[in-house]
Amino acid sequence: MDNFIASVQSQTIYLDGIDNPTSVLTIPFYYWYEKTVLSNILKVSFYKALEEFPILAGRMKTKSDSRNVVVIDKSSLNMPDYTDSPCNVHFQTLKDANFDVSLLPVNYPLERMNRVPPGVAGHSMKLAEFHIIRMKDDSGMCIYANISHAIFDGTSYCAFMKRWTEISRYILTAHEKQDMHGVDISTQGFQFDRSILETDEHSECDAIDPVFRKLYKSTIVSRFVAWISPELCGRLLKLALASLNIHNYYYHLSGSAIEHLFRLIQPLVEPDISHISANDVLTALVTVLFAQAFHKAGSLSGETEILATIAVDIRPRVERLTNANYAGNAIVLKLATSPLDLLLKGYSPHSLVAVACNTRRAVDGMDKHYCSQMWNFVNSDPSGYISLVGRLARKPNTYMLTNHTRFGYYETDFGSGLPVLVRPAFLTSENFVVIMPGRPRLGSYELAITMSPKVAKGMMESEYWKCIY
């Protein structure tokens, strides 16, 4: 830790409008490993990785103009929580139970983020927490890694985790050779300055979806949320979530089932679509499942379409970001709209291909001009963007989706082997979907969905669900 502190340079990082709606959300994942790594190796490599990500030891504050900043003060760092502790549950027990975390002891993992102890002057919300849980008889380990969404998106989160594992393997090799002297690990130069997202590019064509423009409206509530501290906003969000009857559900989809759907609809792809991907098919499947689940739950009265709000990484779409090693939020939202009458028909490849093509059109429309317009749009009034995201989350015909299949979760080998499972710990919005890669060598997928039991029941009764299982 001393080497990390010595490496820190005090600085203030200004967050922008893209960061605002996620300022009280976190990105929490469980990484399950069948073999363990020495505590000292993990800890030394963690603080070495932290040298390249000092933002994780910053304090988030709200300025008088409602802008959030992260202050990295070398003399008063807000260090991430880091815990390494034993557990009396055997790894095989959890594996047999499909890694049901309710089998872990109470308070495992330790979750302290957004929980501010009363009466502690100057205490700040942690921006990251990590808990290494060592299973009974050294039978395996679980790494719980939770990072604030205010500072990182999924790509940045995985960049930190992969960097930690790279350094761990490097140090482990040196340890095995009994040569820990002179360990010199080159840095990769990650960038946290949000100004790299700024653009002065203008286009006469308005690429912003009309639904976004309609919902993008600053209100008393959104201005209040933008004004208050992230700690208080986090408390209010937890209270709001506690009042909802929503749960996390995890579903495994075999690669062969998705490949079958892909081959089924490939000949039916519409002429203006150059190609569709497996991810387009997955998104189409989720859209149809939600439409039929919403319908069975009786929540679509008066609605004529389903809106899939897709979170898309703009790094590959903006040239200056392609090789910038930008570690921050570089995601913008895009709507893919599908008519409800099409989705409520029985099992039909024609319905599925129509939604897949709508998805592909939406994603292909996210060129550099759209990305620039969205950046200007969300930064024109950050409280308006907060209002937009909040209103979308409350619309009865809308769900939000983020695809993590290409983020490299299963590339995180600390030196004892790849994880056997990586899974989101919890999600913090109703009707929210994370598409995850399946377990290594299976070529499968896993859906993590937060929804009400009523919607979950409707989804299970869908003909599409029955056809892929």
Image (cartoon, grey):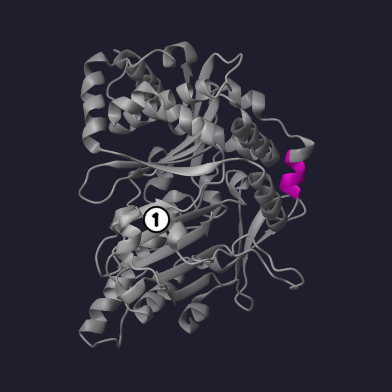
Specify the quadrant of the image occupied by residue 112.
bottom right
> Is disc 1 placed on a helix, strand or loop?
helix
Q: Callout 1 environment at 10 Å: few (<14), some (14 to 19), or many (20+)?
A: many
**Quadrant placement of the C terminus:** top left
Q: Label 1 sits on what residue type?
A: Cys
* Residue 362 visible to the viewer: no
In the rendered image of this protein, does residue 242 appear above or below residue 35? Answer: above
Identify which residue is drawn at 61% across, 27% down: 395
Direction from residue 271 to residue 429 in the image, left or right: right
Direction from residue 46 to residue 298 in the image, left or right: right
> Which region of the structure is painted magenta?
222-227
Q: Position of residue 161 (x, y in %)?
A: 39, 61
Total marks in image: 1
Of 452 and 279, nearer the camera is 452
In the rendered image of this protein, does residue 217 appear above or below residue 198? Answer: above
Q: Main secondary structure of the magenta part?
A: helix
Identify which residue is drawn at 37% across, 56% down: 99
Q: Is residue 223 magenta?
A: yes
Of 338 and 110, nearer the camera is 110
In the rendered image of this protein, does residue 197 appear above or below residue 68? Answer: above
Q: Position of residue 216 (x, y in %)?
A: 66, 30
Report the residue marked by disc 1.
Answer: 158
Of 240 and 328, nearer the camera is 240
Q: Is residue 376 magenta?
A: no
In the rendered image of this protein, does residue 380 appear above or below residue 291? Answer: below
Q: Position of residue 329 (x, y in %)?
A: 51, 48
Direction from residue 264 to residue 156 in the image, left or right: right
Q: Position of residue 265 (x, y in %)?
A: 26, 19
